[in-house]
Amino acid sequence: MKTDIEIARETELLPIEKVAKKIGIKKEELEMYGKYKAKIEMKKEQEQKAKLILVTSTNPTPYGEGKTTMSIGIADALWKLKKKTLVTLREPSLGPVFGMKGGATGGGYAQVVPMEDINLHFTGDLHAITTCNNLLCAAIDNHLFQGNELNIDESTICFPRAMDMNDRSLRSITIGKGKTNFERNDSFVITVASEIMAIFCLSKDLMDLKKRLGNILVTFDKKGKPIYAKDLKVEGAMTLLLKDAIKPNLVQTLEGNPAIIHGGPFANIAHGCNSLIATKLSLSLADYVVTEAGFGSDLGAEKFLDLKCQLGKLKPNVIVVNATTRSIKYNGLCPKEDLNTPSAEYLEKGIENLLVHIENMKKISNHVIVCLNHFYKDSEEEVNYIKTKVEELGVPFYPSYAFEKGGAGAKDLAKKIVELCDEPATFKPIYKLADSIQEKIKKVATEIYRASDIIYTEEALKSLKRIEKIADKNIPICIAKTQYSLSDDPKKLGHPKDFAVTVRDLKLCSGAGFVVVYMGNIMTMPGLSKNPAYKLMDIDKNNIITGLF
């Protein structure tokens, strides 16, 4: 079987201006990045006419379950039905690319290309976001060095440095050693978990971006008064660094159909959706927009629906819950080495995880459909068993063969999506923005995670009290927890019952406009595994890359 990079390399790409023409974008509205990538010049907001399709998932295995692959496959399938469609995705982070995933541009015959460029430096957006983040950090420490006019209490500095790489050694550091006159503790987060990334993905336009950057809470003074980035007079320079990055990126699928890729927050430690600018632009250009939210529906979809949709005034027409036989068996405690082996026992134990995700999405929308990302080793018995269980909940079920066949392998699924899009859709978020922070946490924890209790540490209660004094009353939440379980414990697979979740701490992201709620032992700077993907990567004298997959 060919690798993803081999399949991508064999594809003859269309010039990007021809791809743009499919959705009514003129060549002069493009900012070219070579032959096959371009940024789209910012337009005034236009009518959002398209149907919005969200692709989410069950709790995944460590290798992911193909939401991006399915999103691309569905978009290509809709084009085969002569539907003007845009797939709108997040940009890959270099951390997971070199760590576990090895790439994040889809797979098989459902990919976005040029995959090497997208997986690596792309158009430089993540570098710009990283630099913007670290400019603010440098400004804070320079202010301290130059006399501390704002009377900053160094122990309250709450804005960390960032880097787009998995590096656990940077989780806790000491800075200022030597002849700098001060020394303090600091930390790094991965760029995709940074508040700058969240701001980037929730801003309406360049001036809204600038305002949000200025509103970042960075520290407090010695009397307890909050100090923001605008107090350091750095928001203008920060915005300069993002003036090009804020423009959405246009690429194509293997079948030559348009794809917009922009922004890339993680869903387990951030809000897990592409930029609001890209989504709204897509809704004005196409008739159907397919987008995905990271990890399982308990994380990415919940944040997409409760946070992004409420703040951005969006409404999904259809929610697609993507699953695989291996994710179901993984949640049935199947050993990793046996995930691709047919097993009725583990399938029956793990099916409850999929059913919980379906039930949760049905609380929010009346248009839920299940897509099985079909693997060639899946047995007919396994597929039929999953189909029966899903349909017992009154939800349509369709296997997708997009990985093997591209858009042609997802046509039946696409036809059902179109059928549902033609019917009125309901949308009921899990919480209201007017709810208190604790009410929001309780609703998500009990209705989505199915927790029986919520425990707050002393530190969390202290943070909550301080946040409630200075935050907007209608501020949404963004829960950071493990992606492997409905609970906050990665070892509790399947459908855990009678468990409590622990709120370890809370952080106000006043620029992004939400409160991060840390549950369990979630880390905002991941580490590399024992056998990271970078060991398989190489490049030869002819500039041919191998190992991206």
Image: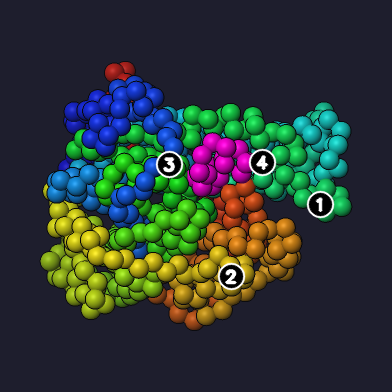
Query: Mark 2 or mark 3: which is in front?
Result: 3
Give the mark, 2 or 4, whose residue is nearer the N terminus: 4
Q: Give the range drawn in magenta.
A: 197-213
Crowdedness near tag 1: few (<14), some (14–19) or many (≥20) residues, C-alpha within 10 Å:
few
- The residue lying at 31 percent from left, 66 percent from top is 425
Residue 105 - label:
none
Quadrant of residue 505 within the rendered picture: bottom right
Q: Is the magenta stretch mostly helix, strand or loop?
A: helix
Give the mark, 2 or 1, whose residue is nearer the N terminus: 1
Which residue matches tag 2?
435
Residue 45 - label:
3
Measure the C-alpha gap from mark 2 to mark 4: 26 Å
- The residue lying at 50 percent from left, 76 percent from top is 446
**Residue 543, percent from left and from top:** 32, 21
Depth check: give the residue in front, 278 or 158. 278
Measure the C-alpha gap from mark 4 to mark 3: 23 Å
